[in-house]
Amino acid sequence: MRAFAAVFSVHFRQFVRDRAALFFTFIFPIMFILLFGWAFSGRGIQTFDVGLSDLGSPQSAGFVAQGLGMVSAGGGKQMFEVEMGPQEEMLRSLRDGDLDAVIVVPADMDLALSQRLPSQLEVYYDPSLASNQQTLIPVLYQVVDGIDRVLQNSTPLIGLEQNSLESHQLRHIDYLVPGILGMSLMFTGLFGALPVIQQRQAHIIKRLGTTPLRRSTLVLGDLTFRMILVLLTAALIVLVGRLVFDVQMVGNWFTFCGMVVLGTLAFTSLGYLVAAFVKTEEAAAPVINVITMPMMILSGTFFEVTSMPSFIQPVVKILPLTYLNDALRQIMVAGTPLHPMTIDIAVMGAWVVVCLAVTIRFFRWD
């Protein structure tokens, strides 16, 4: 019994002294629960940015704007933020991802309603986004019905004509495949830190430092291996998506390969950054999980980033996987962009530069 107590005491003291173990045993699960709660609890409170274009019926346009402004998303927030402007400008903003929908009021609507004649509003939107199909369009129909009731029309006179801005319909699997590819690149790059830490722990890197082998050659060899690995992985994911689910590649293959390489560089650099500060393999795996799990949940891998509550959007906007997933979807399936492609490239490039700069400053080879 005394021996058991001694062994128990040793393990207890070792555990209490290990701050990383304390964190990942007690704090990390709580953080994970809160993260999921924040991500999903606000999904019922959803807002949309809607463009309104008046082609010559200001009274009807005013009714539409007033009707949209009266819809509440809960929590004291309006569901629709309305921006008025010319039709082409509004449609351009919709294509760029700055708007969720555009409503066009026809030129003869004021005259038609004054004569109790039916008239059609036009709504342009991206049907590939689930939030549009499930929430936006049904609520717009309710707004139109409400305007009819306010105008005391016994017979509904205002209709809603739906127009898709996509040249092809996107299924959920079309949305999912680029996200899975982005997630795969993230895991490949970040878990590349483990071999570096293992070699440093075993003093292999230190011994290599005594040989004529240059450190730049060592790093370049590792990067080359990872590039080949991720290109093979990307080819496999695209092939399975094409053969099994008929997911079409609509973009340029060279642009696609370039984005895969840039994404790999970003996450490999982040993996090197982890290796610069984490000394043991046992501590590295939980740290990598802390980094990867939030990105996998919040960066649009499985569902739309726009469905996240507004207070967590600043976190979403700094995660590199958000921009990689967005760029891959634009290239592979012509998905509606969250950001222009130049922004996606610039943000990932910034992650590469910053991570490598910090790694070079703090990395130790022994």
Image: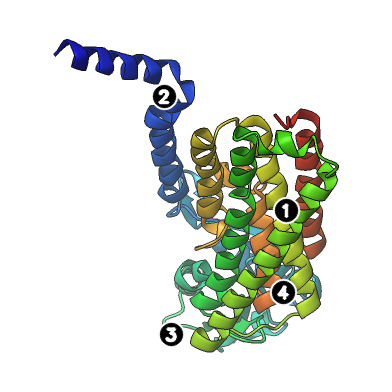
Residue 155: image tag = 3
* 12 shown above or below 71: above
Residue that numbered label 2 is attached to = 22
**Image spot of residue 18 (x, y percent):** 45, 20
Q: Identify the residue shown where x is 46% and y is 42%.
A: 35
Q: Amino acid at mark 3?
A: Thr
Mark 1 to mark 4 CA distance (whole Å): 27 Å
Check disc 1 and report the residue beneath it: 222
Residue 239 sits in which quadrant?
bottom right
| Other-residue count near label 2 (Cα within 10 Å), few / some / many at <14 / 14–19 / ≥20 | few
211 shown above or below 88: above
Dot 4 corresponds to which residue?
331
Give the amino acid type for the residue marked by disc 4 in the picture: Ile
Q: Distance of mark 2 from mark 1, alpha carbons?
A: 33 Å
Please name whichever residue, 209 or 336, is drawn nearer the observer in this view of the structure.
209
Say which label, 4 or 3, has the lower sequence index. 3
Which label sits in the foreground, 2 or 3?
A: 2
Q: Residue at x 55, y 56 (%)?
A: 47
